[in-house]
């Protein structure tokens, strides 16, 4: 059974950089695409970007200038960095398997991690 | 504002059939497959329907999906109290090079 677990700080200051990690168990990270998705409080879902184990990435155009997703195959995990944070980045951040819209069977998100709440505040 | 349009709410009584619509455009639903996610209160989203109508293992056949043109629908038959959740549709958008989601539909079982 594939499981994903997000980790990182729950509180980050404005203008700083958020760093989150997603640990994957039950599957090799070297066999799929891996995504980050976020959900602001009381709102809908927003895709942030995906990475392939080779390091190939694709980011949401609206976040592209601030986002970096990386992979560590030795630790079977991938990470998110989001810079220049504002209050608008306050959200629950989820990691998930999949997300390449061009290729079956990668063009959906399953499974998801439980999510981690990130609050941007001074 | 979400690029896929869903009704904000839907409701039904136990045993009823409920349908949730998802309207998009030629750059997303019109040329791409649609996925549906169920988000129970306080939980992470879960894949409910993929590639328009396929159900992952473990999802009851009470849940079904369909797509026609630039719209898609999720139908839930034999409504149960545990179906009370938020439901989101999603599709890749070729013009935006981005995943687009519906705003979500909150299903209430009366």
Image: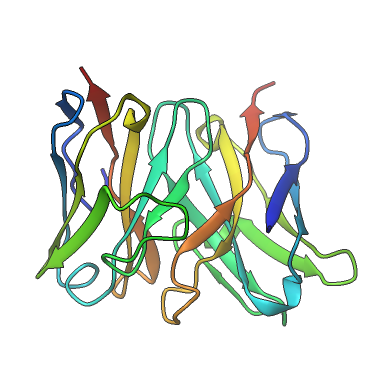
Looking at the image, which residue is at 33% across and 68% down? B96
**B48 vs A8, nearest the viewer:** B48
Q: Position of residue A24 (x, y in %)?
A: 75, 58
Instruction: Pick out the residue farthest to the right.
Output: A74
Instruction: Pick out the residue farthest to the left.
Output: B69
Q: Position of residue A66 (x, y in %)?
A: 61, 55
Q: How many marks?
A: 0
Looking at the image, which residue is at 21% across and 37% down? B78
Looking at the image, which residue is at 45% across and 26% down? B41
**In the figure, residue A28 lies in which quadrant?**
bottom right
Looking at the image, which residue is at 59% across and 46% down? A94
Q: Position of residue B24 (x, y in %)?
A: 17, 59
Whether residue B3 is visible to the viewer of this picture, yes or no, is no
**In the figure, residue B103 lies in which quadrant?**
top left
* In the image, residue A70 above or below residue B84: below
* In the image, residue A73 above or below residue B4: below
Q: Position of residue B93 (x, y in %)?
A: 31, 69
Seen in the image, is B64 located left or right of residue A18? left
**B50 vs B26, nearest the viewer:** B50
* In the image, residue A62 above or below residue A46: below
On-image quarter of the C terminus of chain B: top left
**A73 vs A46, nearest the viewer:** A73
Whether residue B83 is visible to the viewer of this picture, yes or no, is yes
On-image quarter of the N terminus of chain B: top left
**A69 vs A7, nearest the viewer:** A7
Seen in the image, is B55 located left or right of residue B65? right
């Amino acid at each position: 059974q594939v499981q994903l677990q997000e980790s990182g700080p729950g509180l980050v200051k404005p203008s700083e950089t958020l760093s989150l990690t997603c640990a994957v168990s039950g599957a090799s990270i070297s066999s799929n695409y891996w995504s980050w998705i976020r959900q602001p409080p009381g709102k809908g879902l927003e895709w942030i970007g995906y990475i392939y184990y080779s390091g190939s990435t694709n980011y949401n155009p609206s976040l592209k200038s601030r986002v970096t997703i990386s992979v560590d195959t030795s630790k079977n995990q991938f990470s998110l960095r989001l810079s220049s944070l504002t209050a608008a980045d306050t959200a629950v951040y989820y990691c998930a398997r999949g997300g390449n819209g061009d290729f079956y069977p990668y063009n959906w998100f399953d499974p998801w991690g439980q999510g981690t709440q990130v609050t941007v505040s001074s | 504002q979400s690029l896929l349009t869903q009704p904000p709410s839907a409701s039904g009584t136990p045993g009823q059939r409920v349908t949730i619509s998802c309207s998009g455009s030629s750059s997303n639903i019109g040329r791409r497959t649609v996925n549906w996610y169920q988000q129970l209160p306080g939980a992470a989203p879960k894949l409910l329907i993929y590639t328009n109508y396929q159900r992952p293992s473990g999802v009851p056949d009470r849940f079904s999906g369909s797509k026609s043109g630039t719209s898609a629908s999720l139908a839930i038959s034999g409504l149960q109290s545990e179906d009370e959740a938020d439901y989101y549709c999603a599709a890749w958008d070729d013009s935006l090079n981005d995943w687009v989601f519906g705003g979500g539909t909150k299903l209430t079982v009366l």
